[in-house]
Structures are given as structure tokens and as C-alpha cells.
Image (tube, rainbow, N blue to C red):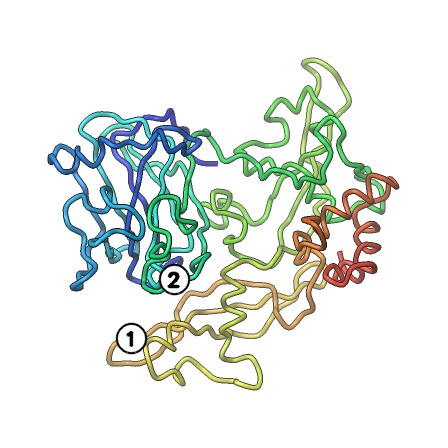
Amino acid sequence: PFAPYDGSAAALRLLSSNGDLAEPGFWTLEAVRLLSDASCAEASAITSVGGDVAAGSAIVTTSGTSCTPFYCFVGGNVFQREPGIATSTWRGKTDSNGQAWLAIEFSAPTVVGCVQFAQQVSHYSSLVTVQVKASLGSEWETIGAKATQEGCPVAFSSNSCCDEEPGWQCEAVESISLGTLSPPPPPPPPSLPPPSDPPYAPSASSPDFGCLEFESMTEVRELGQWCGGGGRNSDPDACHRAYATTFPNDYFTSGYFRTPREYRSPNVRVQRQRCVHNGLEGDEGRCTMEAKQYQCPMPISINCSRAYANDIQRPPQNRWCSSQTTKETCEASYARAGEPWTVSGGLRGRNYRACVWKEGEGCKLQDVGFNCRDPDQEALCIDVWNSVVVSGATCGGLSRELARAERIGYRTAAARIGATFAVCEPCARSS
């Protein structure tokens, strides 16, 4: 979960790192806006911030600046501009820790409930983090993050996604709400019933219970809890609809549960354990984690999808990083490192490493990589779980409805949906 945040900040910064930058080392923001309301309502825009900066009573600092004739950070301009209209933006460069950041220190504690920003199309970050300081002498605390759009949602004719639709109404504007103490679980699809009518879930001892059942359950570690937290000791139904991820975790990968799911690494399998209630009432009621461990495949992450699409060793290419002769082609390439390995349930993992350009040496294989499911294995049901079939209904949503209607397990329901709809076909042969 994110750090607790009472809504007031002495300083705030937007943060990215080399692993999330389209061009490692550089990140361009053409406009940033702060709003007091967590709903990001237009009327709550903090107009005084620009004046504060212009007057010199607020201090803007950065990780570094890479200036060209058109892109250079000047004073507080990035906080005073609008997307698509800016004549001066911030093209930042990373610091010695490989992080790019833009920070503002307020002259007095300021209520900030939402941050909006627009990036430049060729120097964007795929993951942006918001941090605050409660007081100027305190440490930075992460209170929000967002996986951003990778490209313009509409046609563009310059480096700005908003040149055809300038202003904060531009579809390329990203918003990060800071109004909750921890990120809420994702909302259920429209086809799901209200919480008072939970979907059918087989018991832990049922042979029909499998990994897909977890997709409609609450993951307690993302909430910063264990099974007994959140009032589940006194709520058997809520207990039985919850589970804990016990691998990977924050001990294995720092910040694992604070990272959006589509960016988590390693991206091979996840170990889950159900929460079970002892059936007692009052102070004797306990919701605890059962011993049985489920080894479940993870859906393909954005990082792994990018590696698959730019794998220069996939036959018939069979090339190494050293074959890439320009910086541009080098840093768009990935290579396989070592042989694949097999984990529980027959899943295969494979390590990928990015190609990096080193001046005077050429294109080299990065020393550190990341683990993905082996792309040479066929797609699994979890990979198409959120794929739209018709009228907004997804493979997962249709499977839930069928499981509820006929009181069968998700694995059985998904297999029938997979046999009916071509887009859900992997569900007919895997779970």
C-alpha cells in the first residue's frame, strides 16, 4: 500500500526511473497541474501554485535538465503551462541513481488531492510515481502511482500528443488521484453482481477450486493486511473471499505490492493462499491463511510484452545485442539470457535482458534482466481473462456469470466459455 497521506504536503514530486523511460536517461513533461480535490475536478485547480513559483516563494528542483533549443526547464514554467500550448517544457535527465524527478516545495503546507500531467510522445515514462514530504525536513513518501499510456490516444503532428486538442481536456492528460490512504482494489466489471450477492466459490477442499477463482477474490497484501485484517476475523464470508500472495512479495522484490500489477516482476508465477475462518464468533473468531499453496500463472506484463515484441533472438533472427549498430535500434532490443526453466504446474520461465548502448563499445547485453513466462508456450486463460468478447463483456465476466448461474467452478465455466468464443479459446484448454 501507499504511505498514509492526510491531504497536505510541504513538497511534492513526480518520479520515474530508467526502467520505465522510453528513452533511458530522459523524461519530458510539457505541463503539470495540481488540484486540491481528489476527484480532479476542474474547479479545484490550484491556480496559486503558478504565482507562487513566479514570485519565487516556491522552489522547483529537478534531477537534471537536458536543454535543446525547444525543450528546456525554465523557472516554474512547467507548472504554469497547458498541454499542447507550452513553448517551454522540462526535458529532464536522470540523476546518478537512474531516477528522473521534478519537485516543488511550497511556501506553506498545501492541500493537493490530484496531480495531472502531459508527457512528450517520444520521451515518456510508462510508470509515474507521486511522492510528498509532510514537512520540509522529512523523507519522501510514495502516495500514488500510475501506469501511463504508451503513445498518443489521438492523431498528432508534433512531439505533443495535445497539439490537435490543446489544454487540460486533452485525452493524453494523465491524472493521479491522491485521495485515499491506500490504493483501492480494482472495481469489478459491470457484469458482476453487487457485493451482497457474491459469486459462487467452491470450498478449499473442492477439486473444482483452481487459480481462476482468485480473480474474483480480495488480495489482502495489496491492502497492507493479512487474512485477519479489515474486519475479516468477525466476517466469515469476507474471510472466505480473500487470499494472500506469498510469493513474490516485498521481501523478494522491493515495492512489489506498490507496483501496478501489469508492471510486476518476476512475471512467471504467483503463489497464493486462501483465507479461511474458524467458524467461531466474537473474540474467538479468526481468519487465517490456510497452508495449501496454489501456484498460478501470471498474466503477461507490459515489460514482458515489450521484450517479446523486440526479441532479437527469436528464430529466425537468432541475433545478439552486438548485431545492433545504432543507439536507436540497440535500445529498442531485448535478448534472451540462458535457457528456460520449468516451475510448478508446468509453467516455463525465461530471463530477458535489455540491450544497452555504451559509447565507444557499441551495443551490449544489460547485466541485470527480468523473468517472464516463456513466450514459446501457448497462451493461457489468464492472458485473455479481461479480453472483450461482445458489448463490453469479457471472457472473465462471462465465466463468472456462468459459474454463478450453474453453481460450478470458474475453471469449468471458463472452459465452456472458451469453447464458445474464439477470443476466449485459451480457456478451453488451460486454467
- Location of mark 1 (residue): 358
**268 relative position to 310: left or right:** right
- Assign the C terminus to one quadrant of the image: bottom right
Q: Amino acid at mark 1?
A: Lys
**Which is nearer the eye, 166 or 127?**
166
Q: Is residue 178 above or below residue 15?
A: above
Residue 349, by quadrant, is bottom right
**Which is nearer the eye, 21 or 79?**
79
Instruction: Report the mark closest to the observer, 2 or 1.
Output: 2
Task: Indicate the position of residue 378 as horizontal and vertical percent values.
Answer: 69, 68
Q: Residue 156's mark?
A: 2
Of all residues, the one furthest to the left in this rendering is 56
Q: Is residue 374 above or below residue 184?
A: below
Task: Indicate the position of residue 14 as horizontal and vertical percent values.
Answer: 32, 44
Q: Amino acid at mark 2?
A: Phe
Task: Indicate the position of residue 233 as horizontal and vertical percent values.
Answer: 67, 22
Residue 120, by quadrant, is bottom left
Secondary structure under the numbered disc 1 in the rendered image: strand
Measure the C-alpha gap from mark 2 to mark 1.
32 Å
